[in-house]
Image (cartoon, rainbow, N blue to C red):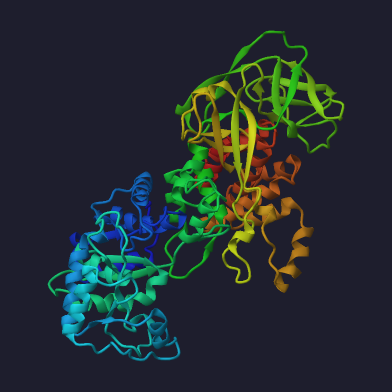
């Protein structure tokens, strides 16, 4: 949680009120209670961030407690994975605990409730109990076993524990109120028979407590001050408090359950059950597949703890459910990697360039800056020779004035090297270009608009590059009543490419992250070996999905659409300038993605007049810097006017402007 804290969210306000009303700060204690039945996903990062973030801010302990009350679905593999994920995010727990630690205490309390006439053994079928429970508008009715004697209930419960009965024969229920308006209070189940091997207690138990019975009591045993849950548990709070009322010692701290909105992300599913189906059906290659929204999948794809924590902090803590645009998550990783990832050159779709006037056999080792965002990153040497690879997309035989890359008769600058001019091409029998013949000039001081990345063929290292796209084509794949979420699987979510990278990457290690210049951010995959480099594409340099997002179908939006389309791209970009620097971070991220998409349609001549914008209009200068960044990434060469504009921005007091200027300086 950021040290420069904004106004308190509602959970922090609750804690501050409790402290003001006499709760000792020394009694603050939080917990993160995952069920070890799957891998943690991006949605869990919010719950983790809230509890551990509060622990960091208040210097209070946070327990990592595994809610292991369902042996049918839980495994030690998941326990280990969860611990690894939480630690990787940078959080430290005070105690590692398990609900199974409390099985005996929970059983003893259940016996106490039976003796107090507040729990009973029910022997009906699940269908009969469901029918008697009623509906939200129809009260339930008492079942035939509700008034068993205490002695009979104690006997049956003891025999349940001893393993005399099969699964489903008997359950233990709390005796509350079958007519209660809250259906969760209509004699909820406390225990069921489950003859399954438990990953910690083995076969010691054959009855297991239900979540609602275990949750609050475990919080109480651990003396958790604030039990923070996602919003779907709000109706459970009444039951949480009822169970505590039955066993609590007034001299001890009473836990308080409070709820926050869970994290929902566009183009993503969060259900562990549905994620498991993706794994079991072979749609993905395991829980850590880089297309999965699991923390292990995001880690393998190249996401950083810093980016995920920043994402959670930006999303904030809310009381109402909403869907966060996945572009915000991508914005956070771009921002982090822009500052930390070394720049290297790689060609994913190569075409051969032959520099006809460059000496045969000559090799020069050029100085290349590792990261302009980090002065301490230094420089490296990259080899330059007569034959190079460039991207096929960076050449056209004929092109218009807005094409700043290589064309016949046109010149471009090769990054960290010389200026070349395309003279002719060689084609195969199908008319495909196989070689571009160029001449080079050592006069590198001339103003050239386009700059391309490249690799020397003689020194290039082959690498497998895995380009990932979103796993689902639909913004909310599990929200359709008439369709299964599997119907929206993106068949093109993985593309494997044979690429060529500069030789400095021979020494790259698993997990290392890089910016492939002009292409995006990539990291070395777990499958990589010393003989076979494998890179995952983490994220592109810009949001490429902005232009394919589903259009709104409301009449209002349909009426507004033509007006928006009639405005030029530069005018649409300018419209963001008035309020850009005053937007909340999530809206700012979306606006930046839109600006970057629009910037592809503008020319340098349209942008340059904005360099003279008044100092007071910081928003306009920021959006100009963002637009300029896109033009530079697409090959625009820096000139004196650009350098002056960037230099002035770097000296400005506006932090956002300085940040954007640093990104392209």
- Drawn side of residue 403 relative to residue 518, left or right: right
- From the top left corner, tell me how far across and down residue 250 is, in percent: 14, 75
The residue lying at 54 percent from left, 29 percent from top is: 533
- Drawn side of residue 231 relative to residue 629, left or right: left
User: In the picture shown, does residue 289 fall above or below 30?
Assistant: above
The residue lying at 74 percent from left, 46 percent from top is: 601
- From the top left corner, tell me how far across and down residue 443 is, in percent: 71, 16
For the residue pair 32 and 146, the one nearer the viewer reads as: 146
User: In the picture shown, does residue 387 fall above or below 35?
Assistant: above
User: In the picture shown, does residue 328 fall above or below 661?
Assistant: below
For the residue pair 215 and 121, the one nearer the viewer reads as: 121
- From the top left corner, tell me how far across and down residue 293 is, in percent: 50, 52
Report the number of discs: 0
The residue lying at 79 percent from left, 59 percent from top is: 566
Can residue 17 be seen?
no
For the residue pair 233 and 138, the one nearer the viewer reads as: 138
Q: Residue furthest left?
A: 251
Can residue 374 be seen?
yes
For the residue pair 396 and 579, the one nearer the viewer reads as: 396
Q: Quadrant of the C terminus?
A: top right
- From the top left corner, tell me how far across and down residue 559 is, in percent: 75, 70
Occupied quadrant, residue 30: bottom left
- Drawn side of residue 336 relative to residue 366, left or right: left
């Amino acid at each position: 949680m950021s040290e420069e804290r904004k106004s308190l969210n509602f959970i922090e306000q609750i804690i501050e009120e409790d402290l003001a009303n006499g709760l000792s700060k020394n009694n603050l204690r939080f917990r993160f209670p995952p069920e070890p039945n799957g891998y943690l996903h991006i949605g869990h990062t919010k719950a983790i961030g809230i509890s551990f973030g509060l622990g960091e801010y208040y210097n209070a302990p946070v327990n990592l407690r595994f809610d292991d009350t369902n042996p049918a679905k839980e495994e030690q593999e998941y326990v280990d994975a969860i611990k690894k994920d939480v630690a990787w995010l940078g959080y430290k727990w005070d105690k590692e605990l398990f609900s199974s630690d409390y099985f005996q205490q929970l059983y003893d309390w259940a016996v106490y409730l039976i003796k107090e006439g507040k729990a009973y053994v029910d022997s009906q079928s699940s269908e009969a109990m469901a029918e008697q429970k009623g509906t939200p508008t129809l009260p339930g009715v008492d079942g035939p076993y509700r008034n068993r004697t205490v002695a009979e209930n104690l006997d049956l419960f003891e025999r349940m524990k001893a393993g005399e009965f099969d699964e489903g024969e008997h359950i233990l229920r709390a005796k509350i109120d079958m007519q209660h308006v809250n259906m969760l209070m209509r004699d909820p189940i406390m225990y069921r028979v489950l003859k399954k091997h438990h990953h910690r207690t083995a076969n010691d138990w054959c009855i297991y407590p239900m979540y609602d019975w275990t949750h609050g009591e475990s919080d109480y045993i651990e003396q958790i001050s604030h039990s923070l849950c996602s919003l779907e548990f709000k109706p459970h709070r009444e039951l949480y408090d009822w169970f505590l009322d039955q066993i609590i010692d007034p001299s001890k701290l009473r836990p308080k359950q409070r709820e926050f909105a869970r994290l929902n992300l566009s183009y993503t599913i969060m259900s562990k059950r549905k994620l498991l189906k993706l794994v079991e059906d072979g749609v993905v290659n395991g829980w850590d597949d880089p297309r999965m929204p699991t923390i292990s999948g995001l880690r393998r794809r190249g996401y950083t703890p810093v980016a995920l924590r920043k994402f959670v902090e930006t999303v904030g803590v809310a009381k109402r459910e909403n869907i966060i645009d996945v572009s915000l998550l991508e914005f956070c990783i771009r921002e982090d990697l822009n500052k930390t990832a070394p720049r290297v050159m790689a060609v994913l779709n190569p075409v051969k360039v032959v520099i006809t006037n460059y000496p045969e056999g000559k090799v020069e080792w050029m100085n290349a800056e590792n990261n302009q965002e980090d002065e301490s990153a230094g420089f490296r040497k990259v080899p330059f020779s007569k034959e190079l690879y460039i991207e096929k997309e960076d050449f056209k035989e004929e092109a218009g004035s807005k094409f700043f890359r290589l064309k016949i008769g046109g010149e471009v600058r090769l990054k960290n090297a010389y200026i070349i001019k395309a003279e002719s091409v060689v084609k195969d029998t199908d008319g495909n270009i196989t070689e571009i013949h160029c001449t080079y000039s050592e006069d590198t001081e001339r103003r050239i608009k386009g700059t391309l990345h490249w690799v020397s063929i003689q020194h290039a290292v082959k690498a497998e590059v895995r380009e990932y796209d979103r796993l689902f084509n639909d913004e909310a794949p599990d929200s359709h009543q008439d369709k299964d979420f599997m119907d929206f699987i993106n068949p093109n979510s993985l593309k494997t490419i044979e690429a060529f990278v500069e030789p400095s990457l021979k020494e790259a290690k698993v997990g290392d992250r890089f910016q492939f210049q002009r292409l995006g951010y990539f990291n070395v995959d777990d499958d990589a070996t010393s003989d076979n480099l494998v890179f995952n594409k983490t994220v592109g340099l810009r949001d490429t999905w902005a232009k394919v997002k589903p259009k709104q179908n409301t009449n209002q939006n349909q009426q507004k659409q033509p007006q928006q389309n009639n405005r030029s791209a530069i005018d649409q970009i300018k419209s963001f300038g008035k309020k850009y620097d005053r937007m909340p971070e999530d809206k700012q991220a979306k606006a930046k993605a839109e600006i970057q998409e629009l910037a592809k349609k503008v020319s340098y001549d349209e942008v340059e007049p904005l360099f003279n914008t008044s100092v007071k209009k910081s928003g306009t200068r920021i959006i100009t810097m963002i637009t300029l960044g896109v033009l530079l990434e697409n090959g625009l060469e820096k000139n004196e006017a650009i350098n002056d504009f960037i230099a002035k921005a770097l000296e400005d007091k506006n932090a956002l402007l300085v940040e954007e200027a640093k990104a392209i300086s």
